[in-house]
Amino acid sequence: MTKPIYDIMKCHDGTTRACLLVDGVLIDPSLPKDNEIAEKKPKKKVVSIQDRLHGKVEEFISVIEGQVDDYIDSDYKMKYDVYNHMLELGCKAAHARKMRPLYRDCYNDLVDVYNKEDDFNQEAYSHLKPKHQKKMMDFYGLIVDDLDRVIKNATAQRKPRKRKTYSAGRLIKKLKYQDEFKKLKLVSVNPEKIIGATELWVFNTRYNRLGVYRAVNSVRGFSVKGCTIQHFDESESVQKTARKPKEALNVLNKRSLKAMFKNMKTKEQQLTGRINAQTILLGVF
């Protein structure tokens, strides 16, 4: 077997190294292979959304400017429906918002000329007769109004964002409440029952306060966010201090709770919606 022969050579990548001599030719290991060259494809130029948007805006502006020239050539008599023309060309609210400042400035400049409030603009438009200045002002005003209409109508037709729906278990995940109050032999109901219910009875074990939450909407019912009851009627959701809580909470059904609450002589207080670690969830109806 013939021993391989190497010799020093400056390679394609600029490095001087020992290269293999084959049939009198030094092999440069830094040169790309044929299959590697074939695999390298030219990268496509990626056009950003903003660049694409800007390009379309320039197209629409050039179209409108052409119509402005035609309006002048027609001796200021041509009719132009900017709104429908822009919609036919595919103009969206995003394009109209970019175009509006340009034509608003043109309109304002001509307003200043018409009212003789700006010497610079008066000189710039001095080649136009006063009646033609007025017609140009009205024409630019029409463009601005129709661009505003494109923006407004696109917003009005936009579909509302669909709200995510969460399970009852996820909604009450962070709700802090008291599981059990052994002194009065009370236990809380499953808090998941609060979601969609229209009436919730609670008892604050620290201050001996009996309270009732009533939902604003009987179809939607309650929801929970963190430790707060949502969608309850603030005027109808009240609490009272129970002087004899054991008697007041002897029977825990809707009818008995309502009757006992009505007979309490203590002062009514509005509920805040907050549920804490001293709150027993007596019942959900």
Image (cartoon, rainbow, N blue to C red):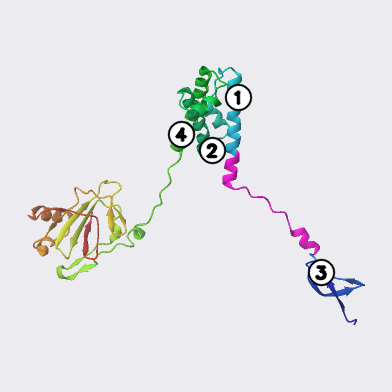
Badge 1 marks a residue whose secondary structure is: helix
The image's mark for residue 11 is 3
Out of 268 and 33, give the one closest to the viewer: 33
Residue type at the position of mark 2: His
Q: Earlier in the sequence, mark 2 or mark 3?
A: 3
Q: Earlier in the sequence, mark 3 or mark 1?
A: 3
Q: Earlier in the sequence, mark 4 or mark 1?
A: 1
The image's mark for residue 226 is none
Residue type at the position of mark 4: Asn
Q: Earlier in the sequence, mark 2 or mark 4?
A: 2
Residue 185 drawn in magenta: no
Residue that protrudes farthest toward the right in the picture: 24
Q: Position of residue 155 (x, y in %)?
A: 45, 38
| Residue that badge 4 annotates | 153
The image's mark for residue 95 is 2
Tell me the mark number nearer the camera, choosing from 2 and 3: 3
| Residue that badge 1 annotates | 69
How far is mark 2 from mark 3, CA to CA?
A: 55 Å
- Write the start and end of the magenta stretch as one range: 33-55
Position of the C terminus by quadrant: bottom left
Q: Earlier in the sequence, mark 3 or mark 4?
A: 3
User: Who's the residue at 21% across and 53% down the image?
Assistant: 213
Q: Is residue 69 left or right of residue 142?
A: right
